[in-house]
Image: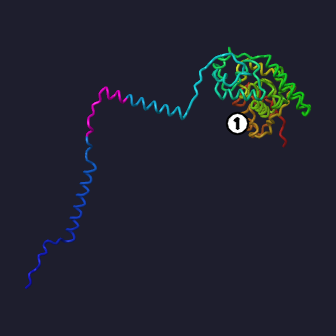
Amino acid sequence: MKKQKNIGFLLTHEQWLGIAILVILAGMTLLFLHHFQPPKEAPIVTINDSTLTRFSAHQAQQDSIRKAQWKKKYPRDTIAIQMQTFDPNTADSSTLVHLGLKKWQVSNMLKYRAKNGRYRKAEDMRKLYGMTDSMYQALLPYIQIDTLVLAQFCDSLRRDRCDTTTQDTTSQYTMRHYISYKRDTILNLRTADTTELKMIPGIGSYRAKQIIHYRKQLGGFVSVEQLREIRALQPLLTDSLSADSLLAHFVLDSVIVEPLRINSMRIERLQKHPYLSFEQAKAIYELRRQKIQLDNIDQLQHLEGFTSEQWQRLSPYLNFEKREK
């Protein structure tokens, strides 16, 4: 009988699997301990006065370098203000800049003069875009306009324009009055166009267009005082003196308006009128929905949302013509 071999050192499949799991767990434990070990305490550094001094000096040096690099990348001119008398019609750009005006303001002044514009009095400097009250008050004592040079310029310009024979009669008339820029110019507010409106001091293209637009919205002016309602003109109406000066340039030869036909006009058209809000137009429309034919303003004065002052200014624009059935 053969002697059996010793196979006690051999392991079963389940035993090998158990050993593998133990090895994996041991490896994971070692890895965890390696990565999540408590942080080492930072060494204690003693800082004395000399260390702080060196650190401050280093920081100041770095700040100085950064500031120098910033100024080199984004240069900014620093100009000393030098107050001196000047004529806004002849002063050069350097003089104007040293008076404290911004470069873009100086550029606007030079463009205005290049287009034959001139400052006829010191107050005209107020119209310069960006001119604040404090800036104007600081410059006012130094503004000296040479009236003789100004008169010679206007005369030569007027003579050159009037001698042109290629223009027709209407163009010559308009240009001559535009160049003269008379302070006593009177315009008919009912018919004035943008070219005529720009003859008035302080009114440029934008304000002239706003006046025409508001006249169209209203359906026509019934009073010169309605110019006070135009937002674009508010800067020219800051006080009673300037307001009277502006309004004195306008008259109404007659009152001709496009009426609001209360009994037939749609609510969308009613609410476009400057004197009517959507709620007010809707209140009028609701009366019509009740089959009420309106005959006079007395029937409307008791509607909610209206005041007596609003009805008073609206009354010239109301038409009570009956709607055709």
Instruction: Work out whether residue 202 or residue 157 is closer to the camera in this orientation and state it.
Output: 157
Vertical placement of 185 versus 262: above or below? above
Which quadrant holds residue 175?
Answer: top right
Tell me the quadrant of the picture where the N terminus can be found.
Answer: bottom left
Q: Is residue 54 magenta?
A: yes
Instruction: Work out whether residue 222 or residue 28 is closer to the camera in this orientation and state it.
Output: 28
Q: Give the color scheme: rainbow, by chain, secondary structure or one colour.
A: rainbow
Residue 156 in view of the camera = yes
Q: Which residue is mark 1?
A: 278
Left or right position of 32 against 263? left
Which quadrant holds residue 161?
Answer: top right
| Residue type, mark 1 in image | Phe
Left or right position of 44 against 141? left
Instruction: Work out whether residue 92 or residue 253 is closer to the camera in this orientation and state it.
Output: 92
Which quadrant holds residue 301?
Answer: top right
Question: What's the residue at 24%, 63% (across, down)?
Answer: 21
Question: What's the residue at 56%, 31% (across, down)?
Answer: 75
Instruction: Work out whether residue 105 or residue 203 is closer to the camera in this orientation and state it.
Output: 105
Q: Which residues are magenta?
A: 41-55
